[in-house]
Amino acid sequence: MKAVRFAVCLTSALLLATSASAQMSLTPAPPNPFPKPIDSEKPKPRTPEKAAPKPAPKRSASEEKKSGFEPAPPKPAAAAEQPDDPLTEPKNIDLVYGAYQRGFYKTAFDMAMKRATEVGDPKAMTMLGELYANALGTKRDYDKSVEWYKRAADLGDSQAMFALAMARMAGRGGGPPNREEAAKWLAASAKLGEPKAAYNLALLYLDGQTFPQDVHRAAELLRIAADAGNAEAQYALATFYKEGTGVPKDAVQSVRLLQAAALAGNTAAQVEYAIALYNGTGTPKNEVAAVALLRKAARANNPIAQNRLAHVLVSGQGAPRDLVEAMKWHLIARTAGKGDLQLDEVLAQLPQADRTKAQDDARKWLGGGGQTANSSGGDNANANAAPCK
């Protein structure tokens, strides 16, 4: 029962944490959403032209007559070959993605439409689905978006399958949400190695609504996505190893996965990894590196990191003691809902001038947009020794 309760809680946290990242990761972020073209192939190199054969020496008419052969009539000039349209070459999708990457969405739309209709390229169809879904280069049209995703998915494109699954899950493209159809496309996409599909399919096995709850199957799918470099899956699987859910309990393996996810930019993983480093849990103790990670996550508006950083600055363990900055981060974390009575008591003793400065600093931070705190996964942050606990 404990494992089931943990899985349900974890699923809820992961679904909230990933609603704007893993599940909708195909949504482009103008102007350069992809660091490089997705699954693109390089244009086919041209075959070097052969040198023209040397013409035979010309013979006179009398010599031709002596040889018994009449000169052959001149051949008609060959029709000039029409050069291929580089856009419709079967393997050249780079031009479409190049336009997309540079933010030329209308150009990308026109190119993708040409390839999709004239060549039947599933990658171009997937691109059309993205452009229609996000109103890039054309008007937003979820019906057409899903239509193009479906055509590409039927041709075996794993990214289209994933996008179609997310559309069906959200009820886009006509009809109510359909979790069963979404699960079918997620499974097909995951089978082809799409890590985002494997991750989201794992969540379905965790929540127990579409499938019977199966934490072992969820762990298998998370491992597939984690091995492919999916940071959300790495963080989730690290939590599995930490708690012993669906896998043997293993603090060392948990920390390795946290480190990978933290390096990939997952803020919640950065917090957990920092706490592990600070306490030496599953990894050699390194307070300086831990505090550096906490600062990074705190600046990314994670209230757990802000709270732990305030504790560190109060204690002076791993960083110079600074009660003014500690109070600043405490106030910011408290605004995001992460209150702390212990810090309230300690910082209440600050001189009024220091309190005023901390309040001004916190107000400036919050006024700059810091009030929207990213708490994804942060409440799982846990440790056994102060100040990170």
Image (cartoon, helix red, strand yellow):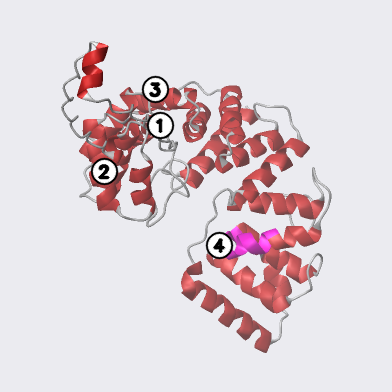
Nearer to us: label 4 or label 1: 1
Residue holding disc 1:
50
Nearer to us: label 3 or label 4: 3
Q: Is residue 322 above or below residue 261?
A: below
Q: Does the magenta stretch mainly form a helix, a strand or a loop?
A: helix
Task: Please tell me which of labels 4 and 2 falls first in the chain.
Answer: 2
Whether the residues at callouts 4 and 2 have beta carbons within 8 Å, the answer is: no
Nearer to us: label 4 or label 2: 2
Q: Is residue 294 magenta?
A: yes
Task: Please tell me which of labels 3 and 4 falls first in the chain.
Answer: 3
> Magenta span covers which residues?
293-303
Residue holding disc 3:
184
Q: Report x, y in % for residue 298.
A: 61, 63
Q: Is residue 56 above or below residue 325?
A: above
Which mark identifies residue 301? Answer: 4
Whether the residues at callouts 1 and 2 have beta carbons within 8 Å, the answer is: no
Secondary structure under tag 1 reads loop
Residue holding disc 2:
111
Q: Quadrant of residue 308?
A: bottom right
Secondary structure under tag 4 reads loop
Q: Residue furthest top?
A: 68
Cα separation between marks 3 and 4: 36 Å
Q: Residue at x 31, y 34 (%)?
A: 89
